Image (cartoon, helix red, strand yellow):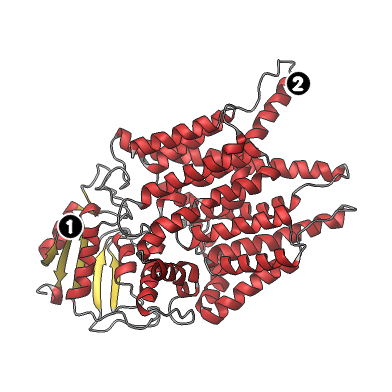
């Protein structure tokens, strides 16, 4: 893994020099992206991540039953690109569903940064598009998880952007392609659907406002497309997952509540909450890298607005002003996640908007050097300063070294399975999944039944309760999801209940992942994902060990102690 990370960093540094032909940028981006995305996904035989676990379960279920019913079951069932499509591909090719997610989808997702480059090279320039694509690749959420609904939907967003800014929607053929890509986005991720559709609508409003004050101004965003885009999305989700629309309608109230609660602390999942949790030296360096890149991103958008303003004052055509109009509401959305999150946590929101905003980072970097040259002119100094793209390349490489875990591994604790098999992350081992399978086979559970809404279904005496850490909690979404099995999975610690309390343990089973057990640090504060050795021993002593292998201990508690 060290060799792989070293080769990726070397490739970025070489391609950032003037000796590397810009004509080779697309191929360089693709292979850097593919290597970066694969290095996590090939660690285990299962999918890696949180939300993708349930998508994987549904794809397996469709594969087994041979039927896809979007109106029956979880809201995820209404997203065929991550449920029925991988199942169908598996049936047709004979490869496993997990392999579809971990290799085929990774290959497809590697095309996204290439698309970002092709969209950006005409709008911003080759260099800006190239480094914007690399920022997208090295953002931790882009490669830390197996591609699921959010990452795959970004492919169709990029294709839509290529269609808008390369060919336009002037012919029947391009409009038909736009309809197909719109359907693909809606069928892949509801979050990005509404963020992108709303940004298009706000972008149209912004450009219409400019038209009021500027004579002879025209733009290429039509009110018809964003209304149609959002209309199709609402119709699809209303027919097959009405509870999703109810949740979206509640979003303003959630945001207001989170804003009111800021006086007592940061919102869970917000950018401020993330920064607050980073206490180590490398953690803080990672925060600094992100803050620098975000500042460059904002500076790039501001510089673009200034350029468009100058063009309009001079009566010139504001080239690609539509792209900036879409980017502005996306940046505002990103900025809002520093304090409030609704249903999209800040790290996911940041990754989502980079499909559009990525190249602005390099534009902001270039703007800094232009400003420096203007300053040197004013003080009559030699103008030898010019954009040194290697500086930005080094910054992005530092980000990758931190996000991949290589920098942490070099000084001791990697805290990621990429470099440390004992790290407590979302790369679940075969032995850990075997422990979950034991619970499925030996606790009186029948096979998965029909979908049930756990929000309105009360536990019964037959309901099996499983207590576990917040990371293993995600694994159970692919093995014993509460929507299909008569179980309830309770987190021993969570952001909302960070303290472990022994008296919360009722009759049931405690699934202890050995990787989650840690010795209490000097500060006495363990990560939410971990369980102290003292508490683990208390659990074992209070019940009966009913299963154990190399990676898992399962303890029966109360009535379940003897089973």
**Quarter of the view holding residue 278:** top left
Q: Position of residue 55 (x, y in %)?
A: 41, 67
Which residue corresponds to the image point at 14% horizontal and 59% vertical from the top-left? 549
Labels in figure, total: 2
Left or right, residue 129 beside residue 515: right
Q: Which structural element holds mark 2?
A: helix
Q: Nearer the viewer, residue 238 or 457?
A: 238
Determine if residue 50 is in view.
no
Which residue corresponds to the image point at 78% horizontal and 45% vertical from the top-left? 308
Q: Is residue 90 above or below residue 402?
A: below
Q: Position of residue 238 (x, y in %)?
A: 57, 79
Reading the image, the residue beneath label 2 is: 378
Which residue corresponds to the image point at 23% horizontal and 84% vertical from the top-left? 461
User: In the displayed image of the protein, which residue is found farthest to the front?
Assistant: 93
Q: Is residue 536 above or below residue 188?
A: above
- Density class for disc 2 (Cα within 10 Å; few <14, some 14-19, many ≥20) is few
Reading the image, the residue beneath label 1 is: 536
Point out the tag, 2 or 1, that comes first from the N-terminus.
2
Left or right, residue 163 beside residue 398: right
């Amino acid at each position: 893994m060290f060799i792989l990370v070293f080769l990726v960093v070397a490739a970025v540094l070489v391609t950032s020099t003037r000796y590397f032909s810009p004509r080779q940028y697309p191929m360089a981006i693709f292979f850097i992206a593919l290597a970066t995305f694969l290095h996590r996904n090939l660690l285990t035989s299962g999918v890696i991540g949180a939300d993708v676990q349930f998508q994987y379960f549904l794809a397996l279920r469709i594969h087994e039953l041979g039927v896809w019913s979007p109106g029956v079951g979880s809201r995820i069932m209404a997203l065929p690109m991550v449920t029925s499509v991988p199942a169908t591909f598996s049936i047709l090719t004979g490869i496993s569903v997990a392999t579809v997610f971990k290799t085929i989808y990774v290959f497809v997702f590697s095309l996204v940064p290439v698309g970002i480059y092709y969209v950006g090279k005409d709008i911003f320039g080759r260099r800006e598009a190239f480094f914007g694509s690399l920022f997208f690749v090295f953002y931790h959420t882009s490669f830390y998880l197996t591609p699921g609904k959010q990452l795959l939907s970004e492919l169709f967003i990029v294709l839509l952007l290529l269609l808008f800014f390369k060919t336009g929607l002037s012919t029947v053929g391009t409009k038909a392609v736009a309809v197909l890509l719109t359907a693909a986005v809606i069928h892949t991720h509801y979050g990005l659907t509404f963020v992108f559709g709303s940004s298009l609508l706000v972008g149209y409003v912004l450009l219409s406002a400019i038209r009021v004050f500027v004579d002879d101004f025209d733009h290429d965003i039509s009110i018809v497309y964003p209304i149609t885009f959002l209309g199709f999305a609402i119709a699809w989700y209303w027919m097959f997952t009405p509870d999703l629309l109810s949740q979206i309608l509640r979003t303003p109230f959630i945001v207001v509540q989170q804003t009111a609660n800021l006086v007592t602390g940061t919102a869970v999942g917000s950018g401020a909450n993330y920064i607050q949790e980073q206490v180590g030296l490398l953690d803080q360096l990672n925060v600094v890298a992100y803050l620098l890149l975000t500042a460059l991103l904002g500076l790039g958008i501001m510089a673009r607005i200034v350029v468009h303003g100058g063009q309009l004052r001079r009566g010139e055509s504001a080239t690609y002003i539509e792209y900036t109009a879409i980017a502005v509401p996306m940046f505002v959305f990103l900025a809002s996640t520093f304090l409030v999150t609704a249903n999209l946590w800040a790290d996911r929101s940041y990754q989502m908007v980079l499909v559009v905003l990525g190249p602005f980072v390099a534009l902001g970097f270039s703007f800094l050097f232009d400003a420096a040259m203007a300053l040197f002119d004013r003080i009559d100094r030699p103008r030898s300063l010019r954009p040194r793209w290697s500086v930005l390349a080094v910054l992005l490489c530092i980000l990758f070294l931190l996000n991949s875990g290589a920098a942490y591994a070099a000084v001791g604790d990697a805290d990621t399975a990429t470099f440390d098999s004992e790290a407590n992350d979302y790369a679940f081992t075969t032995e850990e999944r075997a422990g979950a399978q034991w619970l499925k086979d030996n606790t009186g559970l029948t096979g998965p039944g029909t979908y049930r809404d756990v929000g309105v279904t009360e536990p019964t005496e037959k309901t099996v309760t499983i207590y576990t850490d917040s990371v293993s909690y995600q694994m159970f979404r692919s093995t014993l999801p509460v929507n299909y099995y008569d179980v309830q999975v309770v987190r021993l610690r969570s952001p909302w209940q960070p303290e472990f309390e022994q008296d919360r343990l009722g009759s049931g089973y405690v699934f202890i992942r050995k990787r989650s057990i840690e010795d209490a640090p000097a500060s006495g504060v363990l990560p939410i994902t971990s369980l102290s050795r003292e508490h683990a021993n208390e659990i074992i002593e209070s019940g009966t060990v009913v299963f154990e292998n190399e990676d898992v201990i399962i303890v029966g508690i109360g009535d379940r102690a003897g089973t």
